[in-house]
Amino acid sequence: MSNSDDDNDNIPGTTAVRLQINVSKLERYLVLRISGFKTPLKIRQFKNGQSNPTYLLIDANKKYYVLRKKPPGNLLSKKAHAVEREFKILDALGRNTDVPVPKVYFLCEDDEILETPFYIMEYLNGRIFGYDDWYSAIYTLVKLHSVDYKSIGLENYGNPSGFYSRQIHSLFKVSEAQAATIDDENNKVGSLPRLNDMIQWFKNNEISDDTSIIHGDFKVDYYLEFINWIVFRNWELSTIGHPLSDLANLLMNFFTKEIPGSPLIGLRDVKNLPIPSTELIQAYCEKSGRQYPIPRFEFAIAFSFFRTAVILQGIAARIARKQASSAKAHTYAKLFKNVALMGLEIIDQSAVKSKV
C-alpha cells in the first residue's frame, strides 16, 4: 500500500499522507464511479479533521476532490465517525434546498476498497470572513434551521424530541469510556473535572424542547490561528435536534477565555469587539422569529463547552489507541479539562445568580 504523494507539494491546509490508504484500489474504484476521472492520483491529507481522516485527491486532469472516511481499527463508539450520515444530509440538502453545501458524488460502504466506509465530495475554495460576515453565518444558520426536514426525505434522520437529554446521556457514557482508555504506558486518559456536577446541573436546568435540522459543528474553527476563518464543513454531528445547539456552538468563542500558549480563540475578555455576541443572538432571533433575549441561553452555551470537552477527550483517547488523524491532535487533546472548566464556570455563575 502506497500513496502517490509528493511531499514537496505544499498545498495549503494539507500535509503528506499520515494515515495510509490503498491508492491502487481507490484509483480503480474512482475510474468506475466518477465520469471523466483520470489516473494517476495524487493524495494529500488535511491538517485538521480530528475525527474522520480527510484527504485531498487530485486526478491527472488536475481536478480536486475530497475524501472523508472512518478511521481504521475498532472504534470506541459505534455512533461516532458517521460518514454515512454526513453523506445523507449533504445529498439531501444539495438536491432539495438552497443551503450552501458541497456536491457529494457517492458513498462507498464496501470495506474491501479502503477498509472502512468513505464518501467523495467536491473541493471548494474557502471564503475568508471578516467580523461583518458573522451576520452571514447567522443568516445561513437560520436558513438551515428553517428547512422542512420531512419534505426532503430526512424524517428518519434523528429523533424529533428530547435532543439535549439524549445528548447529555450519550456524551456522559462516551466520556466515561474515553476516560478509561489506556495508552502503551498504562496511563489513563482521565475524566472531565466535576463531570457528575455538570450532568446534574443539565438535568435540573434543561431548556424547552425545539426541533430542526442541525449542523452539529457550525462554528468559527475553534483552533485556527486566524479569527477570520469560518468553517462550515464537518457534517458528522448533524441530526434532527435543538437549533439553539448550533447557535451556541457558533458563538462559543465569545464565551471562551484565552489560554496562553494554546490555539484556542478566546474572545470573552476582549474589550470593544466590533460585533458583540448579544447583537448576533438578536439577529438570529429576528430572522428566526424567536424570543429575544433567549431564556436560559447559558444552558446551551454550557452544553457546547461540555460537548467540546468530550470531543477533545476523544482525541486524547484516539491518541492512546493510535487512531488520531489530525497533525495537531496532541495539541488539541491537552485542552479537554480546560474547556470543561469553562463550562463549569458558566454553570457555577448561573447557580449563584439563581440564589440572588
Image: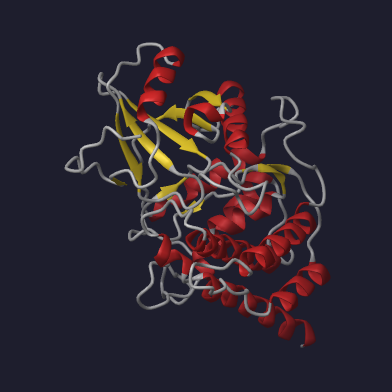
Q: Position of residue 121 (x, y in %)?
A: 45, 28
Q: Indicate whether 254 appears above or below 72.
A: below
Instruction: Residue at 69%, 25% (x, y): give it.
Output: 152
Residues 224 and 220: in front is 224
Instruction: Please state, as top left, top right, bottom left or bottom right, where the N terminus lies in the image.
Output: top left
Residue at left offset 40%, top offset 51%: 48
Q: Is residue 161 left or right of residue 170?
A: right
Residue 250 quadrant: bottom right
Q: Tell which of 274 and 13 is nearer to you.
A: 13
Using residue 101 as the reference point, say whether residue 89 is left or right of it: right
Res 330 quadrant in image? bottom left
Q: Is residue 297 visible?
A: no
Q: Position of residue 355 (x, y in %)?
A: 79, 87
Between residue 18 and residue 167, name the one nearer to us.
18
**Residue 91, position as x, y percentages in the image:** 58, 26
Quadrant of the image containing the C terminus: bottom right
**Residue under the point 68% across and 49% down:** 243
The answer to whether any part of residue 276 appears in the image is yes
Residue 215 in the image: above or below residue 272: above
Q: Residue furthest bottom?
A: 356
Q: Residue at x 34, y 31 (%)?
A: 57
